[in-house]
Amino acid sequence: MTKLAMALSLVAGIAFAGSALEGGTADGAGSRSCSPARVNYTGYPGGDRRLDRLPWVRGTPRRVGLTGLLWYWPPEWRQRRVRQARIFTGGAAPAGYSTKILWVFTGRYARGRAAAQLQVSGRRLDAPGAFAQRFQAVSYAGQRGAPSYASIIDVPAPGCWRLHLATGRLRASVDLLAVPGAEAPTEDGPIACAEDEVRALVDRFVGAFNAGEFGTLDAIFAQEPDFEWYATDGPGDRLEGRDRASLVPYFSQRHELGERLTLRTFRFNGNTPRSRPYGNFEYTLTRSADDLPQATYSGKGAALCYRSGQDVIFVWAMAPA
Protein backbone atom coordinates (compact mmCIF):
# COMPACT_ATOMS: atom_id res chain seq x y z
CA MET A 1 0.00 0.00 0.00
CA THR A 2 1.40 3.44 -0.95
CA LYS A 3 1.79 6.17 1.65
CA LEU A 4 -0.98 8.15 -0.07
CA ALA A 5 -3.31 5.15 0.05
CA MET A 6 -2.48 4.78 3.73
CA ALA A 7 -3.34 8.45 4.28
CA LEU A 8 -6.68 8.07 2.52
CA SER A 9 -7.36 4.95 4.54
CA LEU A 10 -6.64 6.80 7.76
CA VAL A 11 -8.97 9.62 6.75
CA ALA A 12 -11.67 7.07 5.92
CA GLY A 13 -11.27 5.80 9.46
CA ILE A 14 -12.35 9.11 10.86
CA ALA A 15 -15.98 8.71 11.86
CA PHE A 16 -17.77 10.57 9.56
CA ALA A 17 -15.14 37.35 16.13
CA GLY A 18 -16.69 39.34 18.15
CA SER A 19 -16.06 40.65 21.62
CA ALA A 20 -19.32 41.06 23.55
CA LEU A 21 -20.06 44.31 25.30
CA GLU A 22 -21.96 44.38 28.54
CA GLY A 23 -25.64 43.61 28.08
CA GLY A 24 -28.40 45.66 29.60
CA THR A 25 -32.11 46.22 29.71
CA ALA A 26 -33.85 48.31 27.10
CA ASP A 27 -36.48 50.70 28.32
CA GLY A 28 -39.86 50.76 26.65
CA ALA A 29 -39.72 47.34 24.99
CA GLY A 30 -43.26 46.79 23.82
CA SER A 31 -45.39 43.73 23.43
CA ARG A 32 -45.77 44.23 19.70
CA SER A 33 -46.13 41.10 17.53
CA CYS A 34 -42.98 39.62 16.04
CA SER A 35 -42.40 39.98 12.28
CA PRO A 36 -39.02 38.38 11.59
CA ALA A 37 -37.22 39.06 8.33
CA ARG A 38 -37.95 36.70 5.45
CA VAL A 39 -35.37 33.99 4.79
CA ASN A 40 -34.38 33.72 1.13
CA TYR A 41 -33.18 30.52 -0.54
CA THR A 42 -32.35 32.15 -3.87
CA GLY A 43 -28.84 33.12 -5.03
CA TYR A 44 -26.77 35.47 -2.90
CA PRO A 45 -27.42 39.05 -4.10
CA GLY A 46 -23.78 40.05 -3.66
CA GLY A 47 -22.72 38.19 -6.79
CA ASP A 48 -20.33 35.60 -5.31
CA ARG A 49 -21.77 32.36 -6.68
CA ARG A 50 -19.94 30.28 -4.05
CA LEU A 51 -22.30 31.72 -1.44
CA ASP A 52 -25.50 30.89 -3.37
CA ARG A 53 -26.29 27.84 -1.24
CA LEU A 54 -26.54 29.88 1.98
CA PRO A 55 -29.93 31.14 3.19
CA TRP A 56 -29.93 34.90 3.70
CA VAL A 57 -31.99 37.77 5.06
CA ARG A 58 -32.29 41.36 3.92
CA GLY A 59 -32.13 44.36 6.25
CA THR A 60 -33.69 47.79 6.01
CA PRO A 61 -33.38 50.35 4.53
CA ARG A 62 -33.00 48.68 1.15
CA ARG A 63 -30.56 51.19 -0.32
CA VAL A 64 -27.62 50.02 1.86
CA GLY A 65 -28.22 46.46 0.69
CA LEU A 66 -27.62 44.77 4.05
CA THR A 67 -27.52 41.01 3.58
CA GLY A 68 -27.07 38.51 6.41
CA LEU A 69 -25.77 35.10 5.31
CA LEU A 70 -26.97 32.50 7.83
CA TRP A 71 -24.15 29.97 8.17
CA TYR A 72 -25.81 28.24 11.13
CA TRP A 73 -29.13 27.45 9.37
CA PRO A 74 -29.78 23.75 10.20
CA PRO A 75 -30.64 21.18 7.50
CA GLU A 76 -34.14 20.58 8.86
CA TRP A 77 -35.03 24.28 8.51
CA ARG A 78 -33.64 24.26 4.99
CA GLN A 79 -35.61 21.16 4.03
CA ARG A 80 -38.83 22.68 5.40
CA ARG A 81 -38.03 26.01 3.72
CA VAL A 82 -38.57 27.87 6.98
CA ARG A 83 -39.22 31.51 6.04
CA GLN A 84 -39.11 33.23 9.45
CA ALA A 85 -35.61 34.42 10.33
CA ARG A 86 -34.63 32.49 13.43
CA ILE A 87 -31.48 32.40 15.53
CA PHE A 88 -30.40 30.25 18.44
CA THR A 89 -29.71 31.90 21.79
CA GLY A 90 -26.32 31.84 23.48
CA GLY A 91 -24.33 31.98 20.25
CA ALA A 92 -24.62 28.21 19.68
CA ALA A 93 -27.06 25.81 18.03
CA PRO A 94 -28.23 22.68 19.85
CA ALA A 95 -25.91 20.67 17.57
CA GLY A 96 -22.99 22.62 19.01
CA TYR A 97 -21.94 24.87 16.13
CA SER A 98 -21.94 28.63 16.45
CA THR A 99 -24.49 31.15 15.15
CA LYS A 100 -22.25 32.65 12.47
CA ILE A 101 -23.63 35.38 10.24
CA LEU A 102 -21.69 37.17 7.53
CA TRP A 103 -23.08 40.71 7.23
CA VAL A 104 -22.48 42.31 3.84
CA PHE A 105 -23.57 45.78 2.68
CA THR A 106 -24.10 44.98 -1.00
CA GLY A 107 -25.72 48.27 -2.06
CA ARG A 108 -23.81 50.68 -4.26
CA TYR A 109 -24.70 53.40 -1.75
CA ALA A 110 -22.61 51.57 0.89
CA ARG A 111 -19.30 51.91 -0.98
CA GLY A 112 -16.92 54.19 0.89
CA ARG A 113 -19.32 54.75 3.80
CA ALA A 114 -18.30 51.85 6.10
CA ALA A 115 -15.70 51.61 8.85
CA ALA A 116 -13.38 48.85 10.09
CA GLN A 117 -15.75 47.86 12.88
CA LEU A 118 -19.43 46.91 12.98
CA GLN A 119 -21.56 47.65 16.04
CA VAL A 120 -24.53 45.31 16.54
CA SER A 121 -27.09 46.43 19.13
CA GLY A 122 -29.96 44.10 19.92
CA ARG A 123 -33.25 45.24 21.48
CA ARG A 124 -35.99 42.86 22.46
CA LEU A 125 -39.41 43.81 21.11
CA ASP A 126 -41.68 41.58 23.20
CA ALA A 127 -40.09 42.12 26.64
CA PRO A 128 -37.27 44.14 28.25
CA GLY A 129 -33.81 43.14 27.07
CA ALA A 130 -30.78 44.39 25.17
CA PHE A 131 -27.24 43.41 24.21
CA ALA A 132 -24.40 44.77 22.10
CA GLN A 133 -21.42 43.34 20.24
CA ARG A 134 -18.65 44.58 17.95
CA PHE A 135 -17.06 42.81 15.00
CA GLN A 136 -14.15 43.56 12.69
CA ALA A 137 -14.30 43.86 8.92
CA VAL A 138 -13.15 40.88 6.85
CA SER A 139 -11.93 40.43 3.29
CA TYR A 140 -12.33 37.45 0.97
CA ALA A 141 -12.24 36.46 -2.68
CA GLY A 142 -15.40 37.55 -4.49
CA GLN A 143 -16.09 40.41 -2.07
CA ARG A 144 -16.19 43.03 -4.85
CA GLY A 145 -15.56 45.86 -2.40
CA ALA A 146 -18.70 45.29 -0.35
CA PRO A 147 -18.18 46.10 3.36
CA SER A 148 -18.31 42.71 5.14
CA TYR A 149 -18.23 41.59 8.77
CA ALA A 150 -18.07 38.06 10.18
CA SER A 151 -20.05 37.70 13.39
CA ILE A 152 -21.32 35.24 15.96
CA ILE A 153 -24.52 36.81 17.26
CA ASP A 154 -25.03 35.99 20.94
CA VAL A 155 -28.71 36.66 21.68
CA PRO A 156 -29.21 36.35 25.47
CA ALA A 157 -32.81 35.06 25.60
CA PRO A 158 -35.59 33.63 23.41
CA GLY A 159 -38.02 36.14 21.95
CA CYS A 160 -38.39 38.72 19.23
CA TRP A 161 -35.27 40.85 18.68
CA ARG A 162 -34.39 43.78 16.47
CA LEU A 163 -30.72 44.07 15.54
CA HIS A 164 -29.43 47.55 14.74
CA LEU A 165 -26.20 47.50 12.73
CA ALA A 166 -23.94 50.53 12.47
CA THR A 167 -20.58 51.09 10.79
CA GLY A 168 -19.18 54.40 9.62
CA ARG A 169 -22.08 56.27 8.02
CA LEU A 170 -24.17 53.15 7.42
CA ARG A 171 -27.20 52.16 9.50
CA ALA A 172 -29.52 49.17 9.04
CA SER A 173 -31.72 46.82 11.05
CA VAL A 174 -33.18 43.33 10.86
CA ASP A 175 -35.68 41.44 13.06
CA LEU A 176 -35.04 37.87 14.22
CA LEU A 177 -36.93 35.34 16.31
CA ALA A 178 -34.59 33.82 18.92
CA VAL A 179 -35.17 30.21 19.94
CA PRO A 180 -33.39 28.16 22.63
CA GLY A 181 -29.89 27.14 21.63
CA ALA A 182 -27.08 25.11 23.18
CA GLU A 183 -25.13 25.90 26.29
CA ALA A 184 -22.19 28.00 25.16
CA PRO A 185 -18.74 26.39 25.42
CA THR A 186 -16.67 27.56 28.38
CA GLU A 187 -13.41 27.45 26.37
CA ASP A 188 -12.57 28.72 22.91
CA GLY A 189 -11.69 25.25 21.61
CA PRO A 190 -13.10 23.47 18.56
CA ILE A 191 -16.85 23.00 18.39
CA ALA A 192 -19.09 20.94 16.12
CA CYS A 193 -18.99 22.10 12.50
CA ALA A 194 -22.00 23.08 10.40
CA GLU A 195 -22.12 21.75 6.85
CA ASP A 196 -22.27 25.20 5.26
CA GLU A 197 -19.20 26.50 7.09
CA VAL A 198 -17.12 23.46 6.08
CA ARG A 199 -18.26 23.80 2.46
CA ALA A 200 -17.37 27.50 2.57
CA LEU A 201 -13.94 26.60 3.97
CA VAL A 202 -13.30 24.14 1.13
CA ASP A 203 -14.49 26.69 -1.46
CA ARG A 204 -12.20 29.27 0.10
CA PHE A 205 -9.25 26.88 -0.14
CA VAL A 206 -9.90 26.13 -3.82
CA GLY A 207 -10.28 29.83 -4.62
CA ALA A 208 -7.10 30.82 -2.77
CA PHE A 209 -5.15 27.94 -4.36
CA ASN A 210 -6.15 29.02 -7.87
CA ALA A 211 -5.48 32.70 -7.17
CA GLY A 212 -2.09 32.11 -5.55
CA GLU A 213 -3.17 33.77 -2.28
CA PHE A 214 -0.50 32.15 -0.12
CA GLY A 215 -1.22 34.13 3.04
CA THR A 216 -4.83 33.02 2.85
CA LEU A 217 -3.77 29.41 2.22
CA ASP A 218 -1.52 29.53 5.26
CA ALA A 219 -4.47 30.69 7.39
CA ILE A 220 -6.88 28.08 5.98
CA PHE A 221 -4.76 25.15 7.15
CA ALA A 222 -4.23 24.36 10.81
CA GLN A 223 -0.85 25.04 12.37
CA GLU A 224 1.14 22.57 14.44
CA PRO A 225 0.25 20.58 16.48
CA ASP A 226 -3.28 20.33 14.99
CA PHE A 227 -2.13 19.91 11.40
CA GLU A 228 -2.13 16.26 10.29
CA TRP A 229 -1.40 16.16 6.57
CA TYR A 230 -1.97 17.38 3.03
CA ALA A 231 -1.33 14.46 0.71
CA THR A 232 -1.63 13.82 -3.03
CA ASP A 233 0.23 11.84 -5.66
CA GLY A 234 2.25 13.07 -8.64
CA PRO A 235 2.73 15.04 -10.65
CA GLY A 236 3.29 17.41 -7.79
CA ASP A 237 3.22 14.52 -5.37
CA ARG A 238 3.21 15.21 -1.65
CA LEU A 239 3.36 11.80 -0.05
CA GLU A 240 5.17 12.97 3.08
CA GLY A 241 2.15 15.11 3.81
CA ARG A 242 2.70 15.71 7.52
CA ASP A 243 5.35 18.44 7.08
CA ARG A 244 3.44 21.71 7.79
CA ALA A 245 6.48 23.92 7.17
CA SER A 246 6.68 22.85 3.51
CA LEU A 247 2.95 23.24 2.78
CA VAL A 248 2.81 26.85 1.55
CA PRO A 249 6.06 26.51 -0.48
CA TYR A 250 4.45 23.45 -2.09
CA PHE A 251 1.38 25.50 -3.01
CA SER A 252 3.65 28.17 -4.48
CA GLN A 253 5.52 25.63 -6.62
CA ARG A 254 2.28 24.16 -7.95
CA HIS A 255 0.91 27.63 -8.72
CA GLU A 256 4.04 28.44 -10.75
CA LEU A 257 3.34 25.30 -12.78
CA GLY A 258 -0.17 26.53 -13.48
CA GLU A 259 -2.01 24.01 -11.34
CA ARG A 260 -5.70 24.76 -10.90
CA LEU A 261 -8.40 22.93 -8.96
CA THR A 262 -12.10 22.74 -9.83
CA LEU A 263 -14.40 21.40 -7.14
CA ARG A 264 -17.00 19.04 -8.62
CA THR A 265 -18.77 17.50 -5.64
CA PHE A 266 -18.77 17.99 -1.88
CA ARG A 267 -20.32 15.92 0.89
CA PHE A 268 -20.32 16.67 4.60
CA ASN A 269 -20.08 13.49 6.66
CA GLY A 270 -20.91 14.86 10.09
CA ASN A 271 -18.85 15.50 13.18
CA THR A 272 -16.68 13.21 15.22
CA PRO A 273 -17.84 13.82 18.82
CA ARG A 274 -14.72 14.13 20.94
CA SER A 275 -13.44 16.62 23.51
CA ARG A 276 -12.08 18.43 20.43
CA PRO A 277 -14.75 17.65 17.80
CA TYR A 278 -14.07 17.94 14.09
CA GLY A 279 -16.08 17.86 10.89
CA ASN A 280 -15.49 15.27 8.16
CA PHE A 281 -15.99 15.71 4.44
CA GLU A 282 -15.30 14.13 1.07
CA TYR A 283 -15.08 15.61 -2.41
CA THR A 284 -14.22 15.14 -6.04
CA LEU A 285 -12.31 17.71 -8.09
CA THR A 286 -10.26 18.10 -11.22
CA ARG A 287 -6.57 18.93 -11.20
CA SER A 288 -4.79 20.43 -14.19
CA ALA A 289 -1.30 21.91 -14.60
CA ASP A 290 1.54 22.31 -17.09
CA ASP A 291 2.78 18.87 -16.00
CA LEU A 292 -0.67 17.33 -15.44
CA PRO A 293 -3.44 16.94 -18.04
CA GLN A 294 -6.87 17.49 -16.53
CA ALA A 295 -7.67 14.58 -14.25
CA THR A 296 -10.39 13.74 -11.76
CA TYR A 297 -9.41 13.19 -8.13
CA SER A 298 -11.39 12.12 -5.11
CA GLY A 299 -10.47 12.71 -1.52
CA LYS A 300 -11.39 13.15 2.11
CA GLY A 301 -10.62 15.75 4.71
CA ALA A 302 -11.34 17.04 8.18
CA ALA A 303 -11.85 20.52 9.64
CA LEU A 304 -11.74 22.19 13.03
CA CYS A 305 -14.45 24.80 13.61
CA TYR A 306 -14.37 27.52 16.25
CA ARG A 307 -16.88 29.68 18.04
CA SER A 308 -14.95 32.91 17.49
CA GLY A 309 -11.74 31.93 15.69
CA GLN A 310 -11.18 30.97 12.06
CA ASP A 311 -12.17 27.48 10.93
CA VAL A 312 -9.26 25.45 9.53
CA ILE A 313 -8.58 22.30 7.55
CA PHE A 314 -6.21 19.88 9.26
CA VAL A 315 -6.53 16.85 6.96
CA TRP A 316 -6.63 16.83 3.14
CA ALA A 317 -5.84 13.70 1.12
CA MET A 318 -6.67 12.97 -2.52
CA ALA A 319 -5.85 10.48 -5.26
CA PRO A 320 -6.93 9.82 -8.87
CA ALA A 321 -10.55 8.69 -8.98
Image (cartoon, rainbow, N blue to C red):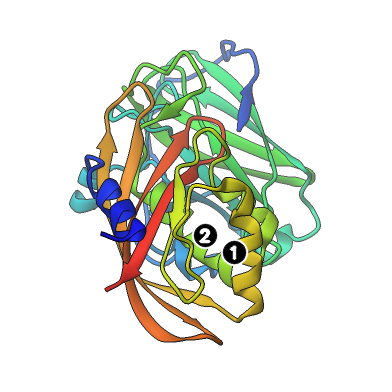
Classed neighbour count for the residue bearing mark 2: other residues with Cα under 10 Å, few (<14), some (14–19), many (≥20): many
The residue shown at (29%, 53%) is: 6
Estimate the spatial distance between the alpha carbons at disc 2 and disc 1, rounded to whole Å.
5 Å
In the picture, measured across the screen, residue 295 lies left or right of residue 133, that is: left
The location of residue 250, given as percent across then percent down, is 60, 63
Q: Work out whether 74 lies above or below 286.
A: above
Q: Inspect this view and state whether residue 141 appears.
A: no
Q: Work out whether 230 lies above or below 210.
A: above
Give, as a three-letter code, the residue at label 1.
Ala
Which residue lies under the disc numbered 1? Answer: 208
Task: Say which element carries label 2.
Answer: helix
The location of residue 19, given as percent across then percent down, is 64, 24
| Disc number for residue 220 | none
- In the picture, which quadrant includes the N terminus? bottom left
The location of residue 228, given as percent across then percent down, is 45, 42
In the picture, measured across the screen, residue 205 lies left or right of residue 295, that is: right
- In the picture, which quadrant includes the C terminus? bottom left
Classed neighbour count for the residue bearing mark 1: other residues with Cα under 10 Å, few (<14), some (14–19), many (≥20): some
Give, as a three-letter code, the residue at label 2.
Phe
Task: Say which element carries label 1.
Answer: helix
320 or 208: which is nearer to us? 320
In the picture, measured across the screen, residue 248 lies left or right of residue 155, that is: right
The residue shown at (63%, 57%) is: 248
Which residue lies under the disc numbered 2? Answer: 205
245 or 297: which is nearer to us? 245
Q: Work out whether 185 lies above or below 99.
A: above
**Within the image, what quadrant is residue 158 found in?**
top left
Cβ–Cβ under 8 Å for marks 2 and 1: yes
